[in-house]
Amino acid sequence: MRSVWGRLLLLTAVLVVGAGCATGEEWGTWYEHRTHFASYDHMGFSVRNTEGSAPKVSRQDMALARDESWWGKPITVSQEQILER
Amino acid sequence: MRGRRIVAAVLALLTLTGGVALAAPPTDRVLSMEKYTTDKARALASRHGRALQELNAGIYHCWPWVDVQKDWIGFYRPKSTQQDDRYLSVHIYIEQDPSQVFARLPFEERAAGMFSRYVGPLLRRMTKDPALTADASLDGFTALLEWMKPVPPINGRPVHEMIAIFMDRESALEYLSGRTDNRTLSARARVLGFDGEAALGAIRIAPTWDDSFVTTYKVANYQLEPGVTC
């Protein structure tokens, strides 16, 4: 009796793990787009905005987008050239 | 024990949801008191520190397309003044979509456009606290407006343009009370221009007007943090 329960448990575990695993094709897709969630914050934004719902943009999303799309150190003057503390 | 569990649960919830602490603007945008070099400036910072943080928060939440970086808000002394004149200064970087119309304008007109859009609303935010405008130690207001120059990057680096606008206290308060118009304010202000790293010196910008952009423009799908009003 114990061995029957043991086999059932093993079979269930295999099915659960198998269902949770990606196929080779899915892994390939993920690998090609592994930067889709560039950061936790990006993931948070994507999870909050699911298809079919109106997207919501928070102030933090905008700050992160600005940081991630920054082109490099701009050519400009520093504030110290104009103002004194 | 139960209390600790509640605190732990609240902290976990805040961490998972992004939380109130993360929704607040960074406080280092306001120059901290120990960085000032004179007693007059330190006294102003001590008296109005809270008003400056509220100013920072207002810009952060209500003008999300605008960036304020570390130490960009404070009671600075314009370099051109001989004595310890202290102006409430705000430096903002303005993000905007590329525009051919804007790009074709000469610098003086681009500067006038930016002055028209931002100086009035900025002054109104800077003077929200009546205690600040009533403070006799405050000598005036400075706005540094910076934006990307509509030219290709140089060696991968974008070029910025900037105008530094210095307004004495009387001129600013007269404008805010409606006794003078925007054009008079800009004519009385001292304006310095900067093209990348090159100082253009004092410039005469084209005539300005009260532009409604700041009060009418909405970032698509932008959602204010809970409890914030603009």
Image (tube, coloured by chain):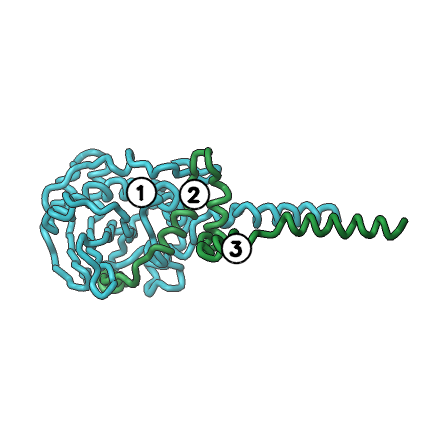
Chain colours: A green, B cyan
Q: Chain of mark 3?
A: A
Q: Residues within 10 Å of mark 1 (few under 14, many from 20)?
A: many
Q: Earlier in the sequence, mark 2 or mark 3?
A: 3
Q: Are marks 3 and 1 on the same chain?
A: no
Residue B201 position, x and y percent, is 12, 59
- Quadrant in which residue B41 is drawn: bottom left
- In the current view of this chain or complex, which residue is farthest to the right? A1
Q: Amino acid at mark 3?
A: Trp
Residue B200 position, x and y percent, is 12, 59
* Residue ID for mark 3: A27
The residue drawn where x is 33% and y is 65% is B37
Q: Secondary structure at mark 1?
A: loop
Q: Secondary structure at mark 3?
A: helix
- Cβ–Cβ under 8 Å for marks 2 and 3: no
Q: Residues within 10 Å of mark 3 (few under 14, many from 20)?
A: few
Q: Amino acid at mark 1?
A: Thr
Lateral position of residue A36 relative to residue B212, left or right:
right
Q: Chain of mark 2?
A: A
The residue drawn where x is 35% and y is 44% is B64
The residue drawn where x is 41% and y is 41% is A57
Residue B195 position, x and y percent, is 16, 59
* Residue ID for mark 1: B127
Q: Nearer the viewer, residue B32 or B164?
A: B164
* Residue ID for mark 2: A58
- Cβ–Cβ under 8 Å for marks 3 and 1: no
Q: Chain of mark 1?
A: B
Q: Nearer the viewer, residue A27 or B36?
A: A27
